[in-house]
Every structure is written in C-alpha cells, then in structure tokens.
Amino acid sequence: MATITIDEKKFEVDPQLTVIQAAAQQGIEIPHFCYHPKLSVAGNCRMCLVEIEKMPKLAIACATQVADGMVVKTRSERVLKAQHAVMEFLLINHPLDCPICDEAGECKLQDYAYKYSIGASRFDEDKVHKPKRYPLGPNVILDVERCIMCSRCVRFADEIAHQPVLTFTQRGDHVVLTTFPETQFDSPYSMNVIELCPVGALTSTDFRFRARVWEMSSTESVCVGCARGCNINIWVRNNEILRLTPRQNEDVNSFWMCDEGRLGTFKFVNGPGRVSSPWIRKDDRKVTVGWDEAIAAAASGLKAFKKGEIAGLASAYATNEDNFAFLKFMRDVVGTKAIAFLEHTAGEDDDLLIRADKTPNAGGVRALGIGSNADSILRRINDGAIRALYALEDDIAANPDWKNALAKLEFLVVHSPVENATTELADVVLPASTYAEKHGTFVNFQKRVQRIRPAVATTEQDRALDGFAMSRWDKFASHNDRWGKGPRRDARPSWRIVQSLAGAMGTKWKFTTAENVFAELAENVPEFKGLRYLSIGTRGALLRTPQRVTEKA
C-alpha cells in the first residue's frame, strides 16, 4: 500500500490507482468530464487538474498514478484558478440551451458551472455555430454545439460497443463529433452514450422533450428483456413510464444496458393493449365482470375436472413469488403434478450483456423445482388426457402448436397483463400486474436473486396500499404526487390472484404482501434458504447451492 496525503488527510491506497481513483475511494470528489472508470484515459478535458508537491506544473488526476509519500491538493489557489479557466474555456462557445435541453437537472456542465466557475465570461465575439439535431443512429440525436469534446462516446464505441464509427473532424473551435462516411452508430448498445455524455449533446430519440428530470420519479428495478437482469431505474411522470436507464451493478451489468432493453420492455405497460379488468366467456362472448365473479368462475371451472385432467403452466416472465404461489396452489389445492414452464430463446448470447434466454426469471422457476418439460403437457392436451389448463403470464398461443392445442381444451384460465393470442382463447382472463407495478424477485442466469419494485400504480394498489408499500419511502410516496393523475389499471399481482382463487376453492392463505410470500418460499426452497428482501437489497444476492448428501456404499 502507498501512503498519500490528499487535502491534508493521510490515506493508505493501492499504488496501482490513479489520483482520481484514490480520491474517489476516500469520498473526495475531483471534478472531471472525460474520465470514466470503465473507459480508457483520454486526459483531454483538463478539469481534474490537481497540485502535487514537487511537481512544477499542475497534473491531471485521471492519468497520474499515486506514489508513496505523494501530497495532493485539490482545492489550492492554483487549482481553483485552473478550474475557473477550464470552465471559462468550455463555456465560450457553449450555447445557452439550458431552458430547452433534456440534460437540464442532470448535467455536469451545469453543476460544475455553479461549483467551479466564476460565473462570468470575457468572451465578446459571436459563438461558433455547429450542426444541431443530427442523428448519429436510429436511437441517438447529436447536438454538436453542446458537445465539449470529452470523447467518452468515441471511446465507448471503440472499446465497449466494438463499433468504432464515431470520430472528431476539423480542428480548434470548429471541431465536430460525427460518424465516418456512410456509417451510423446503430450498435445494440448505442444509447449508453446518452448517460456517458456529461452534457446535453447526445439525447434519446424516443425520450427527447418528454419530461424534465425533476418532474419524474425514479424507481430501482430490473430489466425483463433477457436473463441478464440488468439493474435499471424506471422514470415515471403522471403514472406513465417515460424512460429506463441503467443502474450500476458491477456484478450484473456494470454501467450499461442494451437498446432493446431500454425501448422494448416498458411501452406495453403504458400501451392500449392492457387487460384493464377481468372477463369471462359467456355464450362464446367476452363479458367484463368484477373480480369476485371472475374468481368464482375460475374456481367452479377447475372444480368440474378431476385433478389428473388439469395442468398448470408457470411462467419465466412472472416473479418467484407469483410462481411459488401458483405451484403451491396447483399441488396443494388442485392436486395435480402436471406443472411446467415454457422456455423462450432467440438469437445467441453476446460477449457483453445480451442473453439468448429472453425471460427474466427462468432461473427462479427452475430453482422452485418447476421443469421445462411443457411438451409432455402439450402431448397430453392433444391426446385429450388434459382437459383444463391454468396458465400464468405467458403468451403460449404465440406458438402455433400450442395455439392448436389450446383450442382443444374445455377450460382455460389465463393471467395476463396484456391482450394476446392466449387471452383470445381463454375462458377466464385475470389481469396481472406488470413488473413495474408490483414487488417481487427474479433470478438471473448467474443465479442472482434481484428485487423489482412498483414504479406505477394500479387501482389494486390504491385499494391496498399496505400490501403495496414495503418501505417507509414507498408509504410516503404512495400518498404524494408521485403517481400523478395518469392511467390506472384494475390489475393485481399474480400471487394475490392465486390466493383469492385458493380461498374460493376452500383453502385460506394469509399472505398480505409479496414479502410474506417470499418468506415462506425461503423456508421451503433450499436454494433460497436464509434470503430476505433486506439481504437482497439493491444489488441482489446469490442463490445457495444445496449440499448433496452422498450415501456410503
């Protein structure tokens, strides 16, 4: 270890670190634009200049390695003067776009102008004008006038996305960020440059001009686009999701997430295709009914068949809590062992984040002991052995083989948040909450258990806030303007629906929250033993590996 002094405080640090890394470990902020912990060092913004004893000139903290006995000053008169000069230089040609810029409220240039600038400019000439609203690719818009040439996006395209199409052209104050001729930045990870950009030069084509950051709530959750389970923040205004952004977790996704996860996993929550209330089939017509009538219809329909004639399909799209309640219901209440789930794969795993498994919780379903042998259920339906099916949150009829088989059933109960091919064939449809409307857990392909939290409200949550709000913050937030006056859906978490159905069939459960369900799950499933919502936290926790007992010969 090396002993260094930063602003008159001594620390022992790893000698392989740079000054900016060592300072960050000790909670000392050194301002910077171009430095990023996951990118190579460029050293071109000069904002991180510090004074080091025995060095005649100021040094950039991002590229200077620590040494034993080093004495660093981050707030000396020389450093402050340099910071003022750098900020004045960066702001000379920067447009005053703050009133219309999407980055306002989360812009480093704004923050640093307040903290490290003198608040005045000596520049009296006309600003240099550059291209505005220039599409770098299908998902990213560039405003070159706002760009401070930190090169974060260029290095990300080269080093992380492995699509080196971004570059700088021209020189001096006419330098311009652009793509190479006849190319565009259309990497599956292109939108990560939006968060990397410390100013408002790179913005989202989808989110642009939708809302200001202070108008939205931010909720920690997990992406449901594939088995990676990237950690995300869900941004909501007026009870409507407007964007998803990655949340740092070095064990899962680091700072990144793919474009498909950003754009393809939340719009159905706001979309017009939501199942807004329960319905049942009467005289071959869909009839909207209340929850009590729908639950009663599902219960009476299942009671009409022998237990060997009923099968259940769990879902890798549903939470562990939902699948556990479903498994418990099918085994203990219905009495059937014909329970499985469908796998959903597309494409291949890549070398960064994307997984071929396009479900968020196949690992959790397997850990509960539910197999993926759904083909055996399919054969028994076609043979007429299975006459009734209870399906959880999966559009199984999207597969033509399953669509033909479902048409042969005498009774089909479906949980679904959206209208799809399966709900069209169902006898009872029960609207399920989406991942953005409930508490729960998923298990990713690394066997890491991760929590989801409600970011938007449903009418069910409005009626049962105690069951919905787990934390003190949630209880406060549910009563303020966080939810706005946006759309409400009469949807419920699947575990709560299953519990109501169990009650209608004569079995009373006493779950009041998703945490109650998880507590019983952790008591009964060895892989989850000892886990609690508190221990899972915001970064997740690995499943246990059960000890195998080998009998002696």
Image (tube, rainbow, N blue to C red):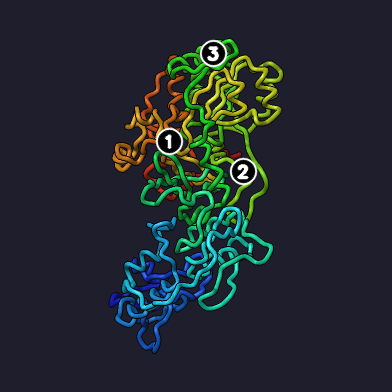
Image mark for residue 301: 3
**Front position among marks 1 and 2:** 1
Q: Are marks 1 and 2 in contact (CB under 8 Å)?
A: no
Disc 3 marks which amino acid?
Answer: Gly
For the residues marked 3 and 2, what is the alpha-carbon distance in whole angstroms? 34 Å
For residue 1, say whether it is visible.
Answer: no
Q: Residues within 10 Å of mark 2 (few under 14, many from 20)?
A: many
| Residue at image coords 67%, 17% | 408
| Residue at image coords 46%, 45% | 242
- Image quarter for residue 50? bottom left
Image mark for residue 357: 2
Could you tell me residue 497's position as x and y percent? 45, 24
| Residue at image coords 61%, 26% | 422
* Residue nearer the viewer, 336 or 113: 113
For the residues marked 3 and 1, what is the alpha-carbon distance in whole angstroms? 28 Å
Disc 1 marks which amino acid?
Answer: Lys
Could you tell me residue 31's position as x and y percent? 38, 70
Q: Quadrant of the N terminus?
A: bottom left
Relative horizontal placement of residue 334, taking residue 220 as reference (left or right): right
Q: Residues within 10 Å of mark 1 (few under 14, many from 20)?
A: many
Disc 2 marks which amino acid?
Answer: Asp
Which residue, given by chain and number where applicable, does mark 1 sit on?
438
Label 2: element kind: loop
* Residue nearer the viewer, 314 or 95: 95
* Residue nearer the viewer, 283 or 300: 283
For residue 185, say whether it is visible.
Answer: yes
Label 1: element kind: loop
